[in-house]
Amino acid sequence: MSDEGVLAEALAALARGEKEAMAVLYDEAGRDLYGLALWRTGNAQDAADVVQEVFVRLAQTRASLGGISKPKAYLMSMAHRAAVDLFRRRRWTVPLEEALLVDGGSGPGERVAEREASMAVAKLTPEQREVVYLRHTCDLTFAEIGTALGISLFTAASRYRLALRRLRKALGVTP
């Protein structure tokens, strides 16, 4: 069964009152939800709070979950909204640009390249960063991204195209 099928069945089971479905949902989507939340908030603790909020909302609205046609996009949309809600409740003390900078890699050359790439991503608009994340990390289609963010498919594709153009220019990559 595909990821979408597993998620759809788990949502339907949750709607029927089967509590065990929460574990299936977490196993199947938790990593992507956390990744989106981390990308959106820039903070591991806040990202964990967002994921927890998504599952609390799932538990509260379980009766209406049986007919979700695109479960992954639905869950990502919930995470997006929960992160926005968290952002509205709190004022950031660390700029997102600083939170996005990575310090990893096995050698100095890799760290420099990753830092440059991270800085290029940080220069994208928040909307562009989010679309790039959802497309590459969560493997959503532009239609699913549009559904998750409440924008049209064409807006999602346009944001992605413009983001790639800006990233290529910032990193000195010619198409």
Image (cartoon, rainbow, N blue to C red):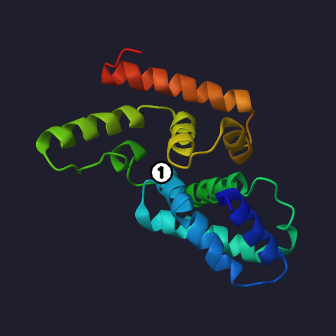
With 162 as the anchor, is 145 left or right in this view?
right
Seen at 50% across and 38% down, the residue is 129
In this view, the residue farthest toward the front is 1
Picture coordinates of residue 87 (x, y %)?
A: 56, 55
Picture coordinates of residue 125 (x, y %)?
A: 51, 33
Which residue, given by chain and number where applicable, does mark 1 sit on? 39
Q: Where is 122 relative to 64, above or below?
A: above
User: Is disc 1 placed on a helix, strand or loop?
Assistant: helix
Residue 166 lies in quadrant: top left
Picture coordinates of residue 63 (x, y %)?
A: 86, 74
Picture coordinates of residue 39 (x, y %)?
A: 47, 51
Seen at 67% across and 55% down, the residue is 81
Which amino acid type corresponds to the residue marked 1 in the rendered image?
Answer: Trp
Q: Where is 120 relative to 9, above or below?
A: above
Q: Where is 11 relative to 42, above or below?
A: below
Give the number of marks: 1
> Relative to the observer, which residue lies in front, 133 or 56?
133
In this view, the residue farthest toward the left is 108
Q: Is residue 85 visible?
A: yes
Q: Is residue 90 visible?
A: no
In this view, the residue farthest toward the top is 174
> Relative to the observer, which residue lies in front, 14 or 84?
14
Q: Where is 150 relative to 170, above or below?
A: below
With 16 as the anchor, is 99 left or right in this view?
left
Seen at 40% across and 37% down, the residue is 122
Residue 1 lies in quadrant: bottom right
